[in-house]
């Protein structure tokens, strides 16, 4: 009988120690971070307008989803959030970016804004200033920026269209950020890859856009 009680006490003590050890492990930040051979999760934010927000497309068919497929092939954990809004301008983006950055701890931000500024004929200096301020906000959060360049139709005048596109390269040099020179480069000359409005790419065009952006994003990941 005494022997049985001793065994019971020993088993009880062993169980208590095991439970406490388990609680210590699960509650420790260091324990959560440690996992040899597994890099930390990378958070990618897509911050753009209708060209990134799947305008006129079935949900889940945009170029961001194609990027996710590319990311899934890498031996690297990631989260990607698409915070794009159709019709957004650089002014609107600047107003809402701080809140988005507070909600999502981004490591990389794909900044795709400015097309609607151009289509409205807004001053290029204003667009550049807004993008510069957004880049500053992102850098202040220790995140990298992939700036996505754009062209606008030539009917806005040669000078305006030329200076509009050149603004992206100038900002990239000035702020030392990575640049996709023209996100629609692979489809721009094929009207079959645009919706009826002639501005928004079709479902079939989305993979081409992702393929244009991917090398620049991959370089930041590496």
Image (cartoon, rainbow, N blue to C red):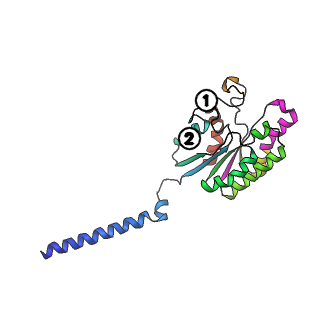
Going 54% across and 38% down the picture, which residue do you hit?
69
Going 64% across and 52% down the picture, which residue do you hit?
100
Left or right: where does residue 186 sit relative to residue 76?
A: right
Give the residue number, with chain letter if any, for mark 2: 68
In front: label 2 or label 1: 1
Q: Secondary structure at mark 1?
A: helix
Q: Which mark is residue 142?
A: none
Residue 162 painted magenta: yes
Quarter the N terminus occupies: bottom left
Say above or below: 67 vs 37: above
Residue 207 painted magenta: no
Q: Residues within 10 Å of mark 1 (few under 14, many from 20)?
A: some
Extreme top residue here? 192
Say above or below: 99 vs 198: below
Going 22% across and 73% down the picture, which residue do you hit?
9
Residue 50 drawn at (x, y percent)? 67, 38
Extreme bottom residue here? 2
Give the residue number, with chain letter if any, for mark 1: 203
Left or right: where does residue 32 sit relative to residue 89?
A: left
Picture quadrant where residue 56 is located: top right
Residue 49 drawn at (x, y percent)? 69, 41
Front position in the image: 65 or 73: 65
Q: CA distance from mark 2 to mark 1?
A: 16 Å
Q: Secondary structure at mark 2?
A: helix
Going 56% across and 39% down the picture, which residue do you hit?
70
Q: Which residues are magenta?
A: 143-168
């Amino acid at each position: 009988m005494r022997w049985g009680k001793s065994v019971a006490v020993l088993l009880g003590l062993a169980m208590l120690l095991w439970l406490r050890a388990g609680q210590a492990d699960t509650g420790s930040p260091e324990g959560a971070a440690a996992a040899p051979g597994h890099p930390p999760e990378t958070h990618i934010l897509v911050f753009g307008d209708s060209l990134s927000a799947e305008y006129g497309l079935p949900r889940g068919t945009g170029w961001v989803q194609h990027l996710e497929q590319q990311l899934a092939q890498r031996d690297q954990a990631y989260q990607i959030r698409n915070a794009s809004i159709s019709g957004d301008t650089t002014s609107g983006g600047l107003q809402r970016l701080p809140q988005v950055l507070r909600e999502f701890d981004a490591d990389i931000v794909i900044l795709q804004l400015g097309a609607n500024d151009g289509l409205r004929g807004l001053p290029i200096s204003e667009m550049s200033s807004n993008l510069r301020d957004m880049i500053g906000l992102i850098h202040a959060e220790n995140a990298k920026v992939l700036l996505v360049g754009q062209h606008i139709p030539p009917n806005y005048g040669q000078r305006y269209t030329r200076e509009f596109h050149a603004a992206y390269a100038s900002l990239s040099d000035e702020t030392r950020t990575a640049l996709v020179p023209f996100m629609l480069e692979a489809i721009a000359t094929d009207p079959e890859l645009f919706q009826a409005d002639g501005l928004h790419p079709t479902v079939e065009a989305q993979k081409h856009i992702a393929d244009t952006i991917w090398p620049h994003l991959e370089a930041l990941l590496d």
